[in-house]
Image (tube, grey):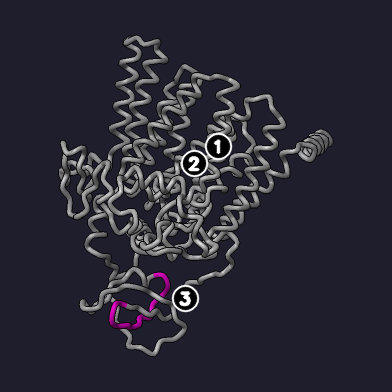
Amino acid sequence: MPKFKNLTKQTLTRSVKDPNTYPNLLSIVAFALIIRRALVQFDFSWDARAYHLPFASKLANIYPDGYTIEPFLENRFDGFPLLMNLVQGILWRLGGDPRFANLLNVSCLIFFVAYVSRRYQLHPWKITLSLLSVPLILIHSYKSYIDLATNVFLSLAFLVLFDVLDNKRFQKRDLFLFFLFGGIAANSKYNIVGVYALLCIAMVVVLYWVNEYKFSKKLLRTYGFCLVLLLITTFSYSKNLVAHQNPFYPQSVDLFGAVQFDGPDSRTQSLNSSQTDLAAIPVALRGEPIYKLFAYSVLEIDLYSDNSGQLFSVDQSNRQTADSRSFKMGGFMVLNLLFWSSLILVTLVRTRSKRLVGKVAVLGAAVALVAMSPGSWILRYWLFIPMVLASVAFVSLEKLDKPDLKLLSYVFQACLLLISLRFTHDGLLQNRPNPINVTSYILTDEDQSACIEASFPEAFMYRITNEDFELQTVQRASSCSLDYLPLD
């Protein structure tokens, strides 16, 4: 017992003296606030109540009797990769409350911080500070969207590839983790699969380089092992190809005009075309090349001319209409990207590391592919960009023997975090609970209004029996003097 007491005392003494202890505690507090925020408020965002939570409830078999969704969403349920929605449904069932589905994103973010901290011996507060400085990462960490969770695992696939590049050797464990992380991402959202394919090609090249540019039996066996893992991790696409003759069902996809897949979704997804979803593009920028939209969004051109005081929201459309040039644009906070790029440049100048050049080249190729992809300007789809960039920047910085530069960098990053918190809509410290209870809801379309009375949030999961009434908006009300409509 005395030995145990002495050991405990020594451990506590070392912790108190360690200058990283208190910042690490602050990072724990930050995640505690995010978890609290996730559990306090139901996510009213359109995607969450239109299909993420309905899909989650359907997969977990907890949706109420009479549940139905729009036909085009039924097609998405039949074809979309639904791994993250399944996890949301499990969380909902375990917690007995749909707000527990909000814990998906923060859980994945914590896993990312833990992985990076352990793998690169980087104190958790350092990577936490950089990630939460990205407004879209901060906002999505307590929402029901699945973009952040998906991009966490895509980012981890990048990091495993970079580890193989750094070490110039590989083990089956590395390949297993690479395809596990990439497969989780690919089976969660369609738009990720292009970047995943690029990473697989990069892994093939890196393995050839590790083998000193020689085709040996060992390398061919490794490629065979990779092919098996790739086929397993693209199950959702194989299923759709067999069932619908379209791996991307229900979307219609045009690959360079050479390969076309037809689906019930009338919008054709095409590389290097911004005409696939005009409603999501600012009116002033419609008709512009898709890569130009991406550049406008990443550089946040005209975003800071908005005088609302809240520049960042969950999908960058809560504050603006399509008439604004900042509609659906931005969300990374360009100062973050410039800062991390500068850190990488400083590291390159001082170390002249060819492997760091290789990492930048892979990430640059991925960014170029994103710039030509459908929805490239909607940055919540591509959160791997700031996550990988920040990880590479700070892991590289830690290798430099420049304590003053490190201190200055983290102080500046803290300032960026404060800016992010200041201009975030529906922010972390919002304290308005929305309890689940039986209440009234006003449903409004273009020329009429009516009421339903239901247990929240089931009200959003029903269609109205009156087929002439098309739901446009939903507003909670403590009482309602309008006519009540029956639920299906």
Could you tell me which secondary element the residue under label 1 belongs to?
helix
Please identify, in this view, whether the residue under mark 2 or under mark 1 is nearer the observer: 1
- Which residue corresponds to mark 1? 340
- In this picture, is 73 found above or below 350? below
Q: Residues within 10 Å of mark 2 (few under 14, many from 20)?
A: many
Q: Nearer the viewer, residue 115 or 273?
A: 273
Residue 303, how many percent across, how many down?
47, 55
Could you tell me which secondary element the residue under label 2 belongs to?
helix
C-alpha span from label 2 to label 1: 9 Å
Q: Residues at badges 2 and 1 in contact (C-beta under 8 Å)?
A: yes
Magenta segment: 445-457
Question: Quick one: quadrant of the N terminus?
Answer: top right
Please identify, in this view, whether the residue under mark 3 or under mark 1 is nearer the observer: 1
What amino acid does circle 2 point to?
Pro
Residue 420, how many percent across, how many down?
57, 53
- Which residue corresponds to mark 2? 386
What amino acid does circle 3 point to?
Asn
Q: Residue at x 46, y 42 (%)?
A: 152
Name the N-terminal-most of marks 2 and 1.
1
Q: Nearer the viewer, residue 90 or 367?
A: 367
Residue farthest to the bottom? 481
Residue 454: in magenta span: yes
What amino acid does circle 1 point to?
Trp
Q: Nearer the viewer, residue 65 or 370?
A: 370
Question: Quick one: quadrant of the C terminus?
Answer: bottom left
Is residue 62 something one can see in this rendering? no
- Which residue corresponds to mark 3? 437
Q: Residue at x 22, y 50 (%)?
A: 251
Name the N-terminal-most of marks 3 and 1.
1
